[in-house]
Amino acid sequence: MNKRQEAIRDARTLGVPKMLILGLQHMFAMFGATILVPILVNVYFEGEGLSIQVTLICAGLGTLFFHLCSKLKVPAFLGSSFAFLGGFQTVAQLDTGIFANMTMGEKLPYACGGIVVAGLLYLVLALIIKLIGVKKVMRFLPPVVTGPIIICIGLSLAPSAVSNASTNWLLALIALGTIIIFNIWGKGMFNIIPILMGVVISYAAALVLNVLGFTNPDGSAILNFAGVQAASWVGLPPFQICKFDLTAILVMAPIALATMMEHIGDMSAISATVGENFIEDPGLHRTLLGDGLATSFSALVGGPANTTYGENTGVLELSRVYDPKVIRLAAIYAFVLSFIPKMAEIIGSIPAAIIGGVSFMLYGMISAIGVRNIVENKVDFTKSRNLIIAAVILVSGLGFSSGITFTVGGTAITLTGLAIAAIAGILLNAILPGNDYVFGSNPQGDQTRGVAVRPNPRAEK
């Protein structure tokens, strides 16, 4: 029998117990990557960053809202976006204008405010696509622009990975090695959750070393459970309302270029996996609307940006159950977990070295995906226009490490390297002759756009 005929599109035929287990499988697929974002942001903000509880409830509610916007048709989960990590790090380092005397905790709401605006850009793109069509819009955002921007996102974060890993190289190497092993040799579900396995196994190693009396090279304890002991089992997520500042908006908003392309790539990948054209029905404008509003809502209450998760597309391919209801079950599980502070504190006790080891793979993978974006979309670098665009983006994104600060109306505004790169790339692509990119002419290339860390397994077959 043909594999496509064996696919299950109504999970109710499997019975309630199996549906619940399938939903749990989707939750595990997204969990490691989703909670890793607030863990990393907390490192940038010296412990005053994003809440894991808020992140989980925003992922759950954002996914449910996305499903409503997409007419309950698209089996996608919205988890934390890695693309904005560089923006969070940049805002944490701001020390000019109103940020000059702020604590890290005071800076965070402004980073979230920038993400609110980034999410609203999805709505603008959704409207434009609705009015003039996806192919005309995508001519202004080809892989020769988005690919190098993604490369810059990953490379700009590389120093923080080395810094964290250096606190305990043994734990960092255990985390990195575990991710590599499960990513290459893992079978079934384990191949889809390498980041989660890397965190779990290296944390187990940290527990053993801590019990045996080992310390970090600087003499500090490997694990600290003070926060875990003080935390209650049940409690409300610590929401905080975002704030707006033009500098923070200019840091965060350009990153939406990468995440919007990731969304389009994920919709192409899910469509190919499920055998439905979700770009046509319910329509790319509807899915962008759901993703953008979910992202803005999350940031509005102190959460990270959301994005459609390639990890869960991998679970669809693995299970052959394409019913969006099982994704909604995973969203409900995430919602419930958000009300357990003790679990959040356990997750928050993960040593910085483990985060560094995971980041070694993660940040490098983001840049490598940018390269893959360029290769699989067959960007022709024998053409001078493409070389010029890529060169200017890379030098701008990495060269302007401190950005450009200028004053408008007495207000200091900082334009980051990534913002400069995005503006320069889009303008050059629009001005220089010879743009021959057509969205849809290379479906496999379209599926690998954006920063999705776990690509669709179908594309690798």
Image (spheres, grey):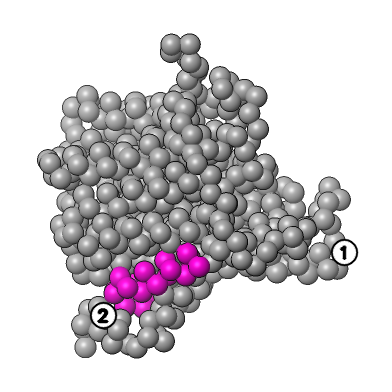
Residue 334 as seen in the image, left or right of residue 292: right
Which-is-in-front pick, marks 1 and 2? 2
Residue in the foreground of this view, choosing between 438 and 16: 16
Disc 1 and disc 2: Cα gap in Å? Answer: 53 Å
Disc 1 designates what residue?
A: 213
Q: Residue at x 42, y 66 (%)?
A: 331
| Percent of width and height locating residue 32 | 53, 62
Disc 1 marks a residue whose amino acid type is Gly
Above or below, 276 against 371 in this view is below
Question: Quarter of the image containing the C terminus?
Answer: bottom left
Above or below, 142 against 239 in this view is above
Q: Residue at x 44, y 43 (%)?
A: 300
| Percent of width and height locating residue 441 | 17, 51
Above or below, 35 against 380 in this view is below
Question: Quarter of the image containing the N terminus?
Answer: bottom left
Q: Residue at x 57, y 48 (%)?
A: 50
Disc 2 marks a residue whose amino acid type is Asp
Disc 2 designates what residue?
A: 10
Residue 311 as seen in the image, left or right of residue 145: right
Which is more N-terminal, label 2 or label 1?
A: 2
Disc 2 secondary structure class: loop
Magenta portion: prevailing SS class: helix
Residue 334 within the magenta-colored segment of the rendering: yes
Instruction: Find the magenta span and give its range.
Output: 316-336
Disc 1 secondary structure class: loop
Q: Residue at x 27, y 42 (%)?
A: 123
| Residue 380 in sight in this render | no
Picture quadrant of residue 337: bottom right
